Image (cartoon, rainbow, N blue to C red):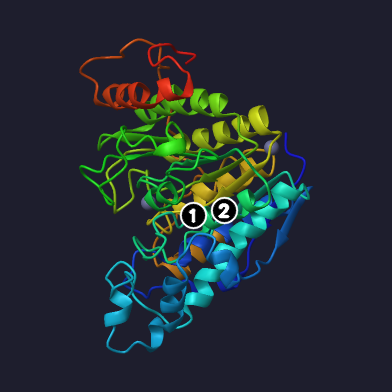
Amino acid sequence: MSDSTLVIWDDVFSGYDFGPSHPLRPLRLELTMALAGQLGVLDRPGVTVQAPTSAPDDLLELVHDPMYVASVKRAPDDLMGRLSLKYGLGTGDVPIFRQMHEAAALVTGATVDAAKAVWEGTHQHAVNISGGLHHAMRGRASGFCVYDDPAVAIAWLLSQGATRVAYVDVDVHHGDGVEAAFYDDPRVLTLSLHESGRTLFPGTGWADQVGADEGVGANVNVALPMGTGDAGWLRAFEAVVPPVLRAFQPQVMLTQHGCDTHALDPLAHLLMSIDGQRVAYRRLHELAHELCGGKWIAVGGGGYEPVQVVPRAWTHLLAEATGAPVDGATPGDWRETARTKGNELAPTSLTDGRSVAWVPWEGGPGAEDDKVDQAVRETREAVFPHLGLDPMSVDG
Ligand SMILES: [Zn+2]
Ligand SMILES: [Zn+2]
């Protein structure tokens, strides 16, 4: 069901590297592209792999404060670090490295390239697995993120005349940077499903954050309890995402695919499997075809299990975006690469072999004592009326 897909990739993405002791390891991207490549996903008909172009300052400044961009450029030479710290640079989460600006501008440029291809119609879908740095703020680095590539790409779409852009963020962390960039803008729907801020960084993303001013109703948060697995996550997704997107009627969708919702992820506390994650990817793909002619831009995001989780999760994303799922065993050559580069035994199967059976939301209040249903109810009650939807009805 896909006409053509652009995959933005270059080995130079590995330059976005905070050092060997930082959880965001470039290895996760390298092993993803190796796995997708060996499975033939990148050689499918209609697939183009293209190197990124760097985002110039005027593009970055659609979202970021010029003073902040200047301080990112200056950070590697700011030996005392005082100026940089003011902008969130030089912290444990965002250590300063040489060529930091160049590496981050390349990731952002790649997501804008993806948006351009989809908006201008040269490709139906476009994927940038290096992107999804959703915590960066207008004037501050945060949560491993220097420039907010999804926000910059959305701002670029608006500059081209887009009036209804939907951003859906399935990373385990709240997509706070993208939310903040468009909180009062009715042209951008931001929708984030995440582990509750009670137990996870960045400590925001509540149901009652529904947007401000003209943007009220165009910001949706589902704050899930720790321990949520496939069945609960997919139940919450289906109870909120399709009705909200159908009400909003996007012209184009940009989705963020952080795979740190997985049970093995070391930084968070949800319990999804690869099987559940790929159902979510399939649903987002289907919704893009249903609602906006397949205009779909997909980016990566978090994911801190660079051998066991990220390569498989995002190979499924690439497989989905290029037309057909992949199944079965991981190739032996890939396992060897993973063992050599990651120094651990790689998974032998492309999925976790889990059943993703789940019970759909049936309307009404849901189960009173179920924490996932409580989260769904809070979101629906807070935001559905602003979208002309009934919080209690299954169809909205
Ligand atoms: Zn498609
Ligand atoms: Zn994350």
Question: What is the C-alpha distance between the residues marked 2 and 1?
Answer: 15 Å
* Res 132 label: 1
Residue at 65 percent of width and 52 percent of height? 115
Q: In this view, does 80 lie above or below 201?
A: below
Percent x, y of residue 191: 45, 37
Front-most of residues 350 and 52: 52
At label 1, the amino acid type is Gly
Front-most of residues 162 and 366: 162
Count of numbered badges drawn on the protein: 2
Front-most of residues 334 and 162: 162
Question: Can you see residue 38?
Answer: no
Instruction: Say if disc 1 is inside 8 Å of ligand 2.
Output: no
Judging from the image, what secondary structure is the residue with disc 2 in?
A: helix
At label 2, the amino acid type is Ala
Percent x, y of residue 144: 37, 63
Q: Name the residue under label 2.
A: 155
Q: Is residue 73 above or below residue 26?
A: below
Q: Which of marks 2 and 1 is nearer the N terminus?
A: 1
Question: Can you see residue 99?
Answer: yes
Judging from the image, what secondary structure is the residue with disc 1 in?
A: loop
Q: Quadrant of the N terminus?
A: top right
Percent x, y of residue 229: 34, 33
Q: In this view, does 262 lie above or below 356?
A: below
Q: In this view, does 359 lie above or below 192?
A: above
Residue at 64 percent of width and 53 percent of height? 159
Residue at 42 percent of width and 44 percent of height? 183
Locate residue 249 relative to residue 338 in the image: left or right.
right
Percent x, y of residue 318: 61, 48
